[in-house]
Image (cartoon, rainbow, N blue to C red):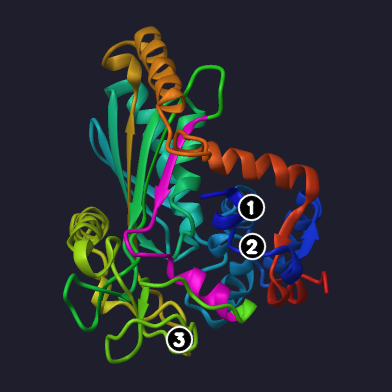
Amino acid sequence: MTDRDRSDVREKDVVLVAEAALAAAVRDRLATVGASPLVVEATTRAMMHASRLGVDSHGVRLTEHYVRMMEGGRVNPRPNVTVRRTAAGSAVVNCDDGPGHVGAYRAVELGCEIAREAGVAAVGVEHSSHFGAAGAYALAGAEDGFITFATTNTDSVVTLHDGAAPFHGTNPIALAAPVPGERPWLFDMATSSIPMNRVLLYRSLNKALPEGVAADEHGYATIDPFAFRMLLPLGGTEYGYKGAGLAGLATLLSAVLMGTTLDHDFIPMYSEERSTPRNMGHFVLVIDPERFAGRALYEATMSRYVAAVRAAPRRGDPEVMAPGDREWKVADARARDGIPIDPDTARFLGFA
C-alpha cells in the first residue's frame, strides 16, 4: 500500500496550507471562545501532530467541533487541571472537564517525572473529554526518552464481533519508543476498522467508504458514509473478536480502572446536547529503559531491531516499514508542500 493509498484526503479536494499559518489559524479560532493559553497550546499541538503525520481524521478538522463544545459548555475552555499522586509509581490527573489534550499531555509529563524515580509510571486521567490522536501523547513521552503507551475509550460506535448494535468506541491504542539518532518508533491505531472521524471526513469529501468497515442501521455493510450507523471492529466480520477485545482493553484501563464513563453510557461526541461534560477517562503508561536493560543496551538493541524490520524480505515492490516510517515520510512531505485540509475545515479556519 502506498502513501497515496493511505492518505485521508486527495489533492483535488483540498486546500494546502503551510504548517505555521495553519497552526496560527487554529490558535486564533480557539482563542475566540476564551480558551486559556494552556488549552490553546495543548489542543493545537495535538491536532497539528495528527495533521502533520497524515491522520487527517483527528487533525485540525476537529477545531470546529472543539469550539462548538466549548461554546456549549460541554468542554471547559479554562480548566484548573490538578494532580493526585496515589503511590510511588501512579497518579491521577483531574482535567476539570477541559479538553482531553490538556489532561493527556499533563499525564505524560507527570509520567515521565515519576518514571525517572520509579522506573515505571501509570497515570490516569479523569473528568476529561475527547483527546484526538492517541499517538500524540505516546510520541511526547518517547521524545523525552521513555517508552510510552496511551489509550482512551469513547462513545459507542463500534459493534461487537457478531453484534448488531454499537457497543465500544473506536478506542485507540498507541505506543512510541525512542530510537537513537532517529525519530521514534510510533504505533497508533483505532481498535475499530477505521476511526469514526474518518467517516465524517469522507462525508465532507462526499467520498465512498472502503469495503467492510461500516454498517447501516440494520447491521448490513455499507460504503455510503451517509448511511453509516456503526463501525465494524478491527478484523471485520471474520476476525472482529480481535478488535473487540482490544477495544475492551482500552475501556478497562481508561474507564473501569478510572471510574469514568463507559462507552455505552457516553453522550455521543456528535450530538445536539453540548452542555453536559462527559467525564471521559484516559490512561498512560511510561517506562524508563534505563531501569531494565539499561539505556545503552536498550538503544543498541532497538537500533538493531528497527534495522532488521526494514531489511526484512518483502513481497513485490512495497517498502517494508517500521511503525512510524510512513508517518514521518508524510510529515516531511507536508512540511515541504503544505498540509491539506478539507473544504469544510478550510472555510471554518478562513482559508476558503
Where residue 222 appears, as percent x and y from the top left, is 39, 83
Q: Amino acid at mark 1?
A: Met
In magenta, the rendered stretch is 184-203
Q: Are marks 2 and 1 in contact (CB under 8 Å)?
A: yes
- Of label 2 and label 1, which has the lower sequence position? 1
Task: Give the label on residue 271, or none.
Answer: 3
Marked residue nearer the N-terminal end (2 or 3): 2
How far is mark 2 from mark 3, CA to CA?
A: 20 Å
C-alpha separation, residue under disc 3 versus residue under disc 1? 25 Å
Tag 1 or tag 3, which sits nearer the N-term? 1
Residue carrying label 1:
48
Q: Is residue 201 left or right of residue 154?
A: right
16 sits to left or right of 78: right
Marks 2 and 3 close (CB-CB < 8 Å): no
Which x, y percent locates residue 28? 75, 63
The residue at the far top in this view is 296
Q: Is residue 128 inside the magenta stretch?
A: no
SS under mark 1 = helix
> Which quadrant of the figure has residue 157?
bottom left
Residue type beneath disc 3: Ser
Vertical placement of residue 67 versus 124, above or below: below
Question: Element under label 3?
Answer: loop
Q: Residue at x 57, y 81 (%)?
A: 203
Amino acid, disc 2? Val
Residue labelled with disc 2: 60
Q: Is residue 26 above or below residue 93?
A: below
At numbered mark 2, what does the secondary structure look like: helix, strand or loop? helix
The reply to whether residue 44 is visible in this rendering is yes
